[in-house]
Image: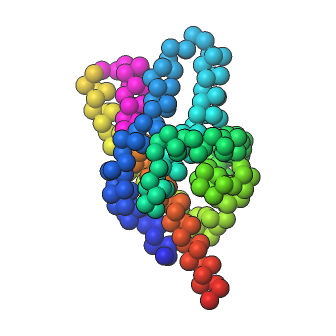
Amino acid sequence: MTTQSLNPKHLLRDCFVICKPIYIPLLILSLPGLILSLTNRLFIEAPLLQNGISLAYSILIVPLFAGAAILYIYRYFVQQKIGLVQSLQAMFPKLAQLSLGVILLLLILIPGFVFLVIPGIYLSVRFGFALYAIALENDSAIGGLSRSWELVKGRWWSVFWAELAGSLTFLIPIGLIGLVIGTTLGENAAVSQNLGAVLGFLVSPFVSVYFVLLYLRLRAIEDASSTDAAA
């Protein structure tokens, strides 16, 4: 493989092919996010509780279900299928490191975006595959960050454009659909928020598959480079 493997056109083509048979299971793994989004407004008058729930979700539920989705997609890709329950069970022993990985990412990325946007973007691309390394390669949180940094090394622009193209491919239709429906129903903050949550939920399996494929392509490129160097 070469950097051509990071071509967004090729990634999107493979993404839609792979996602079709596993779309529903991946939707199930995305349900916690949808439930939180739809119920978040119920706690608007209790901001401390609302913030506590959001924090717990971010550092416990997100890593667990994201890791399970990563493993589920990977095992399907390599033709070693695994059930949803088994994929979740496989993440429980790794949950501490996955959660720590999320916390470290937040501590690294938030200052980067708050003070200067460009460093935040750069670091988000370099460290963006940390959870994938933890879930699939049994790395620690620190090891996952280091692994992601090395995978992207020398390929930052290729990865950035692949991530940007993939994200826009899924976000633009959501925006257009939301605009049309929102215009039809009239301006209503609650309706708009819930609509965005549902649309995001429906495309989440494609996003998950796309980024797992990108991670696997980076691993394959690294392996090919190591083989060439050894030869």
Residue 150 place in picture, x, y as percent: 67, 65
- List the single residue furthest toward the bottom: 231
The reply to whether residue 220 is visible in this rendering is yes
Magenta span includes 199: yes
Return the x and y of residue 93 as percentages of the image width and height.
Answer: 66, 43
Q: Position of residue 88 (x, y in %)?
A: 54, 41
Question: Looking at the picture, does residue 29 appear above or below residue 216?
Answer: above
Residue at (64% x, 84% y) in the render: 229
User: Foreground: 155 or 21?
Assistant: 21
Q: Magenta includes 94?
A: no
Near-viewer residue (103 or 47): 103
Q: Magenta part of the protein: which range? A: 186-202
Q: Residue furthest left?
A: 184
Residue 180 to residue 24: above or below: above
Relative side of 219 to 103, left or right: left
Q: Position of residue 25 (x, y in %)?
A: 40, 42
Q: Main secondary structure of the magenta part?
A: helix
Residue at (46, 45) in percent of width and height? 83
